[in-house]
């Protein structure tokens, strides 16, 4: 395996284990590239399935189980907490609400630190340890911080997190503190926090935002696990929230690799959903622009996706083109309503995740998604990640409603 510039026209190659975050020739993001695959699809499917019965910690991880598609490490270097292996849960009230007969939730919030970032961090922190790093750093809207801090703690490393002041759910700050992270507050939005960490991170620090190509390799395995659960029959649509667009990029890469290896026949269409007030990819996609149409002051109550200038936007466009996908946005009211419906299904999620159901409903209503299409919505974070959001919006409404009943 090696690192490669993600722009095909440049195609610069670099050695795998090094700190470069961008192509030294053209400045585009890097990606991990694999050599030729040594196994047939049938052999791989059986190997991965049988690992579910193994006691090897790598086999018990929903990420490392698929290690034929990941960078290779000595087993003792791997930092894992059995991440992945999350269920696919059918929506019931959610399906009715969206006007769909078959919508299922892949709940990545049911991971060790309650969001999907763990899937990337197990690989990112393993790579950091492999390179001998003592300190890891990231900018975060909260979840990356918690996840990085947990995996760094497991690896005996220092975690330093840069958070936009006042724009992170207290639950997430508490989590990062509990795992022992050093916290730096930055005035401004996530985008400013990211610029700060990039400016301040010296050679002694290993950088773990989703610019980091190793993180995306871990996140990629969501598509492997999902396809395996579906018997290697792709759904029609995969709907994913779009923030910094790491997931979109990782899932697009995964689907490309799965198709190329003959593991799947059909590529599902990927739908990326952003909040209306933080919709740079939607604008860029809609205009067919070659430049990112960034949002200067991103606004949404879904703080995990309050990002105006997503770093992985080019990779995300590539993923949309490859999957014949779509980018759409939804309002904060639609997100709130979708979130409460997912809650009523006994599932629950954080606001950013609920963009998926809101987006699926929007597309079903306009007839883009047929009623009987198979749809998988990716839920990215756990309901307990942002309890303020719930108590602020719904608890007050519930209390008011019951007070009105009593007054009658
Ligand atoms: C990080 C995060 C996102 C955004 O994911 P990207 O890969 O940056 O697009 C969405 N939802 C939750 C809960 C997150 O933590
Ligand atoms: Zn390049």
Image (cartoon, rainbow, N blue to C red):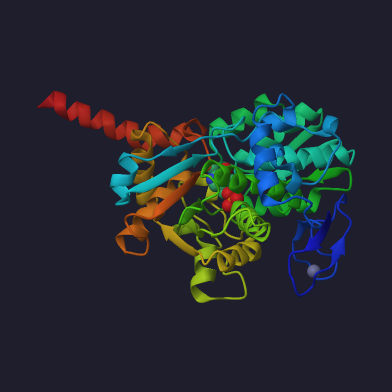
| Closer-to-camera residue (282/63) | 63
Q: Can residue 167 be seen?
A: no
Q: Quadrant of the C terminus?
A: top left
Spot occupied by residue 368 in the image (x, y as percentages of width and height)? 37, 64
Q: Based on the displayed image, in which of its 4 quarters is residue 313 positioned?
A: bottom right
5 sits to left or right of 359? right
Residue 184 percent across, percent down from the top left: 70, 39
Q: Which percent across, then down, holds residue 242? A: 54, 54
**Is 310 left, or right, of 273 in this rendering?**
right
The quadrant where residue 29 appears: bottom right
- Identified at 50% across, 41% down, the residue is 106
Q: Is residue 83 visible?
A: yes
Direction from residue 134 to residue 154 in the image, left or right: left
Placement of the N terminus among the 4 image quadrants? bottom right
Q: Indicate the quadrant where residue 74 lies.
A: top right
Ligand 2 falls in quadrant: bottom right
Q: Residue at coordinates 36% horizontally, 45% vertically from top-left?
A: 338
Q: How many marks?
A: 0
Q: Nearer the viewer, residue 64 or 124?
A: 64
Vertical placement of residue 136 versus 10, above or below = above
Q: Position of residue 148 (x, y in %)?
A: 70, 37
Front residue of 396 and 268: 268
Residue drawn 75% across and 66% down? 28
Q: Nearer the viewer, residue 256 or 230?
A: 230
């Amino acid at each position: 395996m090696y690192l490669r510039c993600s722009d095909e026209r440049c195609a610069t190659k670099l050695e795998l284990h090094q700190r470069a975050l961008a192509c030294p020739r053209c400045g585009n993001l890097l990606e991990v590239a694999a050599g030729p695959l040594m196994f047939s699809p049938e052999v791989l499917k059986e190997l991965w399935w049988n690992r579910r019965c193994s006691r090897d910690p790598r086999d018990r991880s929903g990420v490392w189980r698929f290690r034929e598609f990941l960078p290779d490490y000595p087993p003792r270097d791997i930092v894992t907490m059995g991440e992945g292996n999350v269920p696919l849960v059918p929506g019931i009230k959610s399906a009715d609400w969206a006007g769909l007969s078959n919508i299922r939730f892949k709940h990545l919030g049911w991971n060790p630190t309650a969001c999907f970032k763990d899937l990337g961090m197990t690989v990112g922190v393993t790579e950091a340890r492999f390179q001998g790093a003592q300190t890891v750093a990231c900018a975060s809207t909260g979840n990356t911080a918690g996840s990085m801090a947990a995996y760094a703690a497991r690896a005996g490393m220092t975690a330093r997190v840069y958070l936009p002041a006042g724009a992170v759910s207290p639950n997430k700050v508490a989590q990062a503190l509990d795992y022992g992270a050093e916290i730096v507050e930055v005035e401004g939005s996530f985008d400013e926090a990211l610029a700060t960490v990039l400016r301040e991170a010296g050679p002694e620090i290993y950088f773990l935002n989703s610019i980091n190509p190793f993180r995306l390799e871990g996140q990629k395995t969501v598509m492997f696990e999902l396809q395996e659960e579906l018997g290697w029959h792709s759904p029609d649509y995969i709907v994913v929230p779009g923030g910094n667009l790491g997931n979109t990029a990782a899932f697009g890469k995964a689907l490309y690799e799965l198709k190329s290896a003959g593991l799947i026949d059909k590529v599902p269409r990927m739908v990326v959903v952003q909040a209306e007030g933080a919709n740079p990819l939607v604008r860029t996609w809609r205009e067919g622009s070659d430049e990112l149409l960034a949002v200067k002051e991103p606004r949404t109550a879904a703080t995990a996706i309050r990002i105006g200038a997503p770093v992985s936007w080019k990779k995300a466009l590539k993923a949309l083109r490859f999957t014949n996908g779509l980018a759409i946005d939804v309002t904060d009211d639609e997100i709130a309503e979708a979130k409460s419906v997912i809650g009523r299904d006994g599932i629950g999620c954080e606001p950013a995740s609920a963009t998926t159901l809101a987006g699926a409903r929007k597309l079903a209503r306009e007839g883009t998604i047929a009623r009987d299409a198979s749809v998988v919505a990716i839920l990215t974070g756990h309901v307990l990640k942002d309890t303020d959001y719930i108590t602020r919006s719904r608890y007050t409404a519930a209390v008011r409603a019951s007070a009105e009943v009593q007054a009658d």
